[in-house]
Amino acid sequence: MDSLFETEKHERPAPSPVRQAIRFLLHTLVALAAWVGLMALGYALNPSGVPQWAILAFSLAVPLMVGLIIALIRPDELATMVWLVGLIGLLIFGQWVLQMPTAPGACLQCDRTEKLTRTFFSFPGPSGLIDNDGPILATWPAAALLGYSIGAWIGTRKRS
């Protein structure tokens, strides 16, 4: 007869916060390394005329596959939370962009929404703010972290 006390014996002890932080950091670094590898491959091949939406899709898909593979090998619930780092990064860059002054050639007379969409997505055209590097500094890494989280989520669900 199983009692309440016997089932408690089989529970694993809670992992230490330091180990959790290290695992979370490692998953974040793996996701960003997958994205950096994609960018390095893109710069090495130097394909001309690749639209930014395609780069955004690849920035999401490649880390998704890496997260899926890692989660199938070793599932970890912390891997599914890496998207928060991307969100925080987008929020920080968004605040920075919103504080920037506008000028000719730098999103002159843009409202807040237009400033953000032109900076991070170059839609309908680049804003001229942060040297038009908004996608590579904020959008694509955030997409990579989101993709990794989705892949890890799919992998942990398939594994269990």
Image (tube, rainbow, N blue to C red):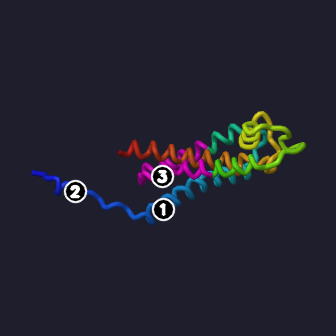
- Residue pushed farthest right? 104
Percent x, y for residue 10? Answer: 23, 57
**Label 2 vs label 3: CA separation?**
26 Å
* Mark with earlier residue (2, 1): 2
Other-residue count near label 3 (Cα within 10 Å), few / some / many at <14 / 14–19 / ≥20: many
Q: Which residue is mark 2?
A: 8
Residue at position x 68%, y 49% in the image = 138
Question: What segment is highlighted magenta in the picture?
Answer: 60-88
Q: Which residue is mark 3?
A: 79
What SS does tag 1 mark?
A: helix
> Looking at numbered disc 2 in the image, what kind of residue is underneath it?
Glu
The circle drawn on residue 151 is none
Residue 151 magenta-drawn? no
Percent x, y for residue 28? Answer: 55, 56
Classify residue 56 as left or right of residue 18: right
Q: Which residue is mark 1?
A: 21
